[in-house]
Image: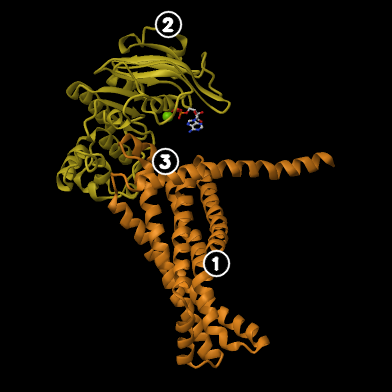
Chain colours: A yellow, B orange
Amino acid sequence: MITLSDVHKSFGPNRVLCGINLSIAKGESLVIIGGSGTGKSVLLKCILGLVRPDKGIITLDGQDVTRADRDAFLARFGMLFQGGALFDSLRVWENVAFSLLRGRAALPADQAREIAIEKLRRVGLKPATADMFPAELSGGMQKRVGLARAIAAEPEVIFFDEPTTGLDPIMAGVINALIREIVVEMGATAMTITHDMTSVRAIADKVAMLHDGLIRWSGPVGDLDSTPDPYVQQFIHGRAQGPIESVR
Amino acid sequence: MIGTLQNGLAAIGRPALDGLAAIGRITLFAFSVVSHLLRPPFYPREFLTALVQIGWFSLPMVGLTALFTGGALALQIYSGGSRFNAEAVVPSIVAIGMARELGPVLGGLMVAARVASSIAAEIGTMKVTEQIDALVTLSTNPLKYLAVPRVLAATLAVPVLVAIGDSIGIMGGWLVGITRLDFNSAVYIANTVDFLEFWDVASGLVKGAVFGFIVALMGCYFGMNSGRGAQGVGAATKSAVVAASIMILAANYLLTEAFFTS
Ligand SMILES: Nc1ncnc2c1ncn2[C@@H]1O[C@H](COP(=O)(O)OP(=O)(O)O)[C@@H](O)[C@H]1O
Ligand SMILES: [Mg+2]
């Protein structure tokens, strides 16, 4: 269970988050939607402690995340970054197995490699990619390696920042199904950022829309189409006209 | 008129204040790097990679720098010495000059240009592409994983580079001495060996270690604090080289003061 209460974050004069209140139950899949630059990535980074909120409290299972033991806390999380964020000095399999090869419960290299290849297969990549370097892969393939790395240690909570951006529709479908499967089978809690309405419907239990630094709307995915909220309606139908200014 | 003057002064004063604040942050950064040196986890593979990158691949550059410097030094000392009929001091002054000053300082500056820039650019790129954030989420301390191995490698490798540079520089002086200045090879070598003291060489090596530490520290610091985008990485790289060079020269003065005035 993750809760955010009254979370604020500004970068200089740029007020990005202005009082976010949100909660995600264990084993739930929350999808965050909202225009580009509204602070969705910043929101995830605040929870992970990569960005320090100016104000507000974030808790995991009732405990303030800033007080928790960092290593134990982070070990429960997996994150797919928007740009992949693969380590370009390491081979693909070493990226995927990064956390398996290190730390107290470090696995031997050949065993970690096997797990990495299995995770790569799950995101639709052939074993031959394991020995390549990230720079040799296309953007969509890098994204999938990032996804494999995020799920490699089988974390309890997984954050996906635009998992299907840059993928073809078929691969996007595969990834959507994979995320759903991770939530259902592994019982993981997932928080996904996406602009892709197909993804939203495939992945989400619950949807939250971020606009102007606030959670504009949140509710079960089933209520998404019937909500009268004009912001949500404009967003899900991709209309240029509406309360959300299209020139920003 | 006054306005322009004020603006001009402000343009100098603001960076000066920022510079002082940066020195404070760099000092704190240095302390945390040192404090992590002895605490596990250790990353031997990153350390070895850094050692090869910083030590081995800098050899040709340091060698060439020393060779030309030693040669030029011999010519200068010969022409300067001839004013006092003291041409015979060439071998010993070349050796002392290389070992105490030029070997470590020029070696350090060349390494600053090559290594501080590449470390800053690499770590800066990792920062702007969120790789540093990714390290954190994978329960790895970026300071330990990126900075500690590089700083340790540079601190150990640069003295060795300096020792090699000293030898090649002295050889450059000898080469010029016997080919251009009519020195007898055996006499030149005997003079070099007889007058060079242990501390002449050792002080240069200590300087080398300090300069190596400074170079890697600056590369890591500016890389990890890189601004956003390609421009941020470019600025970080430039700052790392400038800061490392100035700090090397300042540290050189302070160390010389400490070692050779009594
Ligand atoms: N490290 C940072 N420094 C300064 N500004 C930032 C930083 N990270 C994000 N921002 C700003 O915060 C805003 C939200 O960014 P982001 O969360 O990446 O948007 P998105 O919703 O598209 O993921 C943007 O205006 C961006 O410029
Ligand atoms: Mg984003």
| Distance between mark 1 and mark 2 Cα atoms | 82 Å
Q: Where is B214 relative to A28, above or below?
A: below
Amino acid under disc 1? Phe
Q: Is mark 1 on a helix, strand or loop?
A: helix
Question: Can you tell me which quadrant of the image ligand 2 is in?
Answer: top left
Q: Please say whether residue A38 is visible from this viewpoint.
A: yes
Looking at the picture, tell me which residue is in the foreground, A167 or B59. B59
Q: Are marks 2 and 3 in contact (CB under 8 Å)?
A: no
Q: Name the residue under label 2.
A: A228
Single out the residue that lies furthest toward the right: B1
Q: Nearer the viewer, mark 1 or mark 2?
A: 1
Q: Do labels 1 and 3 share a chain?
A: yes
Q: Quadrant of residue B55?
A: bottom left
Q: Quadrant of the N terminus of chain B?
A: top right
| Distance between mark 1 and mark 3 Cα atoms | 47 Å
Q: Nearer the viewer, mark 1 or mark 3?
A: 1
Query: What residue is drawn where x is 42% and y is 65%?
Result: B159
Query: What residue is drawn where x is 42% and y is 43%?
Result: B32
Q: Do labels 1 and 2 share a chain?
A: no
Q: Where is B255 relative to A58, above or below?
A: below
Q: Please say whether residue A235 is visible from this viewpoint.
A: no
Mark carried by residue B260: 1
Q: Do labels 2 and 3 share a chain?
A: no
Q: Quadrant of residue B126?
A: top left
Q: Name the residue under label 3.
A: B129
Report crowding for label 2: few under 14, some 14 to 19, many 20 or more residues within 10 A (C-alpha). Answer: few
